[in-house]
Image (spheres, coloured by chain):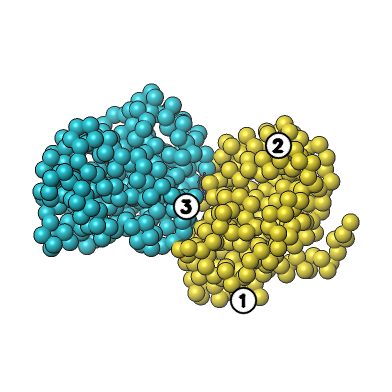
Amino acid sequence: MEQVATRDAYGQALKRLGEKYRDVVVLDGDLSKSTKTADFAGAFPDRFFNMGIAEQNMMTVAAGLAASGKVVFASSFAIFAVGRAFEQVRNSIAYGQMNVKVCATHAGVTVGEDGGSHQSVEDIAIMRAIPNMQVVVPADGPSTVQAVNAIYHEPGPFYLRLGRSKVPTIYTDEMDFKIGRAIKLREGKDVGILACGIMVAEALRAASALAAAGIEAAVLDVHTIKPLDREAVLQVARETGCLVTAEEHSVIGGLGGAVAELVSSEFPVPVEKLGIPDVFGQSGKPSELLAFYGLTSDKIVELARNAMGKKAHK
Amino acid sequence: MREINDQVTAELEKKAKILRREVIKMLGKAGSGHPGGSLSAADIMACLYFWEMKYDPQRPDWEERDRFVLSKGHVAPVLYAALAESGFFSGEKLASLRQLGSPLQGHPDLRKLPGVEASTGSLGQGFGWAVGMAMAAKLDRRDSRIYVLLGDGEMQEGIVWEAVMAANQYKLDNLTAIVDNNGMQIDGHLSEIMSVEPIAPKLKEFGWNTREIDGHHIPGILEALEEARNSKGKPFAIVAKTIKGKGCSFMENQVDWHGKAPSADQIDQALRELA
Ligand SMILES: Cc1ncc(C[n+]2csc(CCOP(=O)(O)OP(=O)(O)O)c2C)c(N)n1
């Protein structure tokens, strides 16, 4: 299977967006080679601003540019874009519904060797809690490209969460991406697996493994965590009677939290949440860390069986 | 008072070379990490750990010790090398840098490794941490000094200047900030990205005593540290002009060597140059 890092897809998509639209302005905080905004910077030096190692100021500057008609893409690592600049994102960008796309790379533990200080495991929860903020977590290269285009055309603040490491390509370039519309990748009636980001590929592998054992798992790529595709999630809940969520994020407040919030009031079914337990990350190879924190298809299979065991009537 | 003479200088130069060699070896083994800023800081680190600071590796939490905060936490390798060479832990541990389960995390973690005074890596935060330590020392009337090493790129962070103001306000003359002024950050030269110059005059205007030195000239570093120690009523900043990648010819002044590991051949060459 082809492997592309979502940050690479972001860099390419941003450059193409710049070719088409004059109002695209890109900001970065001394990480342009890593976030891949350097691709845009090389092509459009006059519309790229390196704001230095000053993420808080970068976000308020982004709001000012947006207030003057620009469509701003502001990038850094997830830990700094969300963490360091949280209150600027909240009060300068989201509060006024400014047209700023906070596009953060190096999310989650697949940051790898840099360690826990650099691995954001809580950014989805934080961004999701901000009113007006929409949160998108693409699974692969093609869906990242589509997401970048989609958030350009949809006015208002977005948080786009991208990764450092290469991930398997699931979709074709022509895939149909709509903000807020989850993608059903597999039908099934026994258990529903809802995943985002790098865990979508794992969910598909888990579903194959379950199928071999005679269990039919539905798989949903919930690339938009907010606004959550309520209909799609509830439909899977109704069809299967139990859910597993999978994300490269804390089990607190991310996709699992969003899904549990919804089904607990609308259609209560057991929800098993796979994610990073309530701990910080650490140094290690990305693959080692995924195994260490159980972010694997094997673990999804295990949780799928647990969820099925908790169904009200089996 | 101890005399700064040729022998002392030669000893410290030797120590700095050891630190540089360890940095190269560690990064080679780890396959990732930050050589440029580790090497630019090696002489300063040698002067701090093998001359200036008082500490006891057998008692890492001895209250009266001086404290060092690596605010530019990405150069953890040079800190780890200094801690190992000082006896806080065995040098064999250095080979585990950045590996799963190692106490030598990619960025310093005070809960994992003795001698690490602050968990850093998010630029700007170590400075405020050091200010807090200096305030505590004053509160407790302890005669321990606090040292903090900053990157010049790091000074682009607003919170650095918040810490600068706090140190001035509370007259933290037990605090010495050292700026590793190598003129480079990740995306290029500071002058092209976001200039922070002139650093020393800015700090002076913010109420600090300052001194500008060559950050690779051992006697100059020692004299500046002594001046800082004797300065009363104000915090002291040493702005040390340095060369990113210093000591390793192919890394010197190369932006590219901010954050990548040398290959096997490059390690050989670097170790030959640092022999
Ligand atoms: C808050 C924050 N933003 C961004 C980074 C990513 N980063 C790591 S090192 C670095 C450049 C640091 O430059 P400088 O302080 O001059 O250090 P040196 O050149 O001495 O290595 C950046 C941007 C970070 N660690 N923390």
Residue B213 relative to residue A15: left or right: right
For the residue pair B72 and B270, the one nearer the viewer reads as: B72
On whether ligand 1 comes within 8 Å of the CB at mark 3, the answer is: no
Residue under numbered circle 3: A116
**Percent position of residue B120, x then y:** 57, 49
Residue A246 relative to residue A173: left or right: right
Q: Secondary structure at mark 3?
A: helix
Disc 2 residue crowd, few under 14, some 14–19, many 20+, Cα 10 Å: many
- Chain depicted in yellow: B
Residue B179 relative to residue A11: left or right: right
Quadrant position of residue B275: bottom right
On whether ligand 1 comes within 8 Å of the CB at mark 2, the answer is: no
Reply above or below: A291 against A41: below
Callout 1: chain: B
The amino acid marked with disc number 1 is: Arg
Q: Earlier in the sequence, mark 2 or mark 1?
A: 2
**Colour in which chain A is drawn:** cyan
Residue A271 marker = none
Q: Secondary structure at mark 1?
A: helix
Callout 2: chain: B
